[in-house]
Amino acid sequence: MKISIIGAGPAGIACGVLLKRYGVDVRIFEKGKIAGTIRNAWRVENFPPLGFISGEQFVKQLEWYAEQYGLEIVHDEILRIEDLKLRGRSGTYDCDIAVVATGTKPRRIPEFEVSERVLYEYINLPKDTKRVAVYGGGDVAIDYAIHAFEDEIMPTVFVRNNELKAVSKLVEYAKERNIHIKLGDAIKRVEEGNSGIVIFSDSGRYEFDALLIAIGRELNVPEIDVSKMKVYAIGDCAHPDLRQSSIAIGDGVRCAMEILREMK
């Protein structure tokens, strides 16, 4: 039986590890790198036994688990799931059971994407960045701003609304660092500058080395058209309103146990 997991984030890796522990072969398809968006995180705090660890440390742990259990990682983006088939950008694969663990993707603002210095993930910041604008008021935006501050990059956060939606602890961390947060200051236009970008907001004109957009996320799932095979959805793509890595890992474990029960 060919079992395929689409996505090598926390949910996908957890599901794959549990299946391998029980002697079940599984392939994991990933278009990018193991761990997905959590590699951007300044700090991961929702695993009490682990304490506070950085996103980078979390990624290393997932990579270590994948290596220890010999998980087969296929580097391809799966675009469509059909009965007993996965159709990827680079090939077509046989599949009896599919687990979708593709998570979410950033909500884009295409008209702001005037250069490569307008980004959606922290890890893609240019190495020469000294000043960065962050657009958004949720957990990801504030985490990005703190991450920048800790990397000795000066962040300025632009928030469309008059209040932050980030969890109170993140807001507290930002205030402790005196991070500049401009409430009720929507970005209206972005232009490419001589060596960076120029931002026009409700309050004026500003120059930065880069802009990180973090205004929310949306589902990121392949097209699914099946009638004869089982397809599971786990992690953030199954619970986009929760989006907790600890929940994603638990969801991956639960899914693996359900697959094992069905196989018996």
Image (cartoon, grey):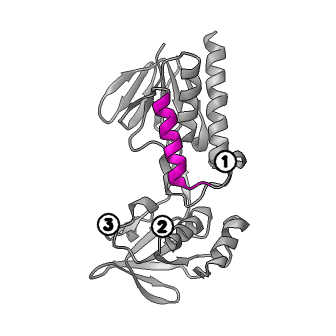
What residue lies at 73% left-to-right and 67% top-to-bottom? Answer: 168
Residue 196 occupies quadrant: bottom left
Q: Which residue is mark 2?
A: 213
Q: Which residue is mark 1?
A: 50
Name the outermost residue toward the bottom: 204
Q: Nearer the viewer, residue 52 or 240?
A: 52
Q: Which marked residue is nearer to the observer: mark 1 or mark 2?
A: 1
Q: Which residues are magenta?
A: 53-68
Q: Is residue 120 above or below residue 176?
A: above
Task: Name the spot of residue 155 as percent of width and height, x first.
Answer: 50, 77
Q: Which residue is mark 3?
A: 116
Which residue type does callout 1 highlight?
Leu
Q: What kind of secondary structure does the magenta stretch mostly adopt?
A: helix
Which residue type does callout 3 highlight?
Glu
Task: Looking at the image, tell me whether mark 1 or mark 3 is earlier in sequence order.
Answer: 1
Task: Looking at the image, tell me whether mark 1 or mark 2 is earlier in sequence order.
Answer: 1
What residue lies at 50% left-to-right and 46% top-to-bottom? Answer: 59
Which corner quadrant holds the C terminus?
Answer: top right
Does residue 189 appear left or right of residue 163 in this picture? left
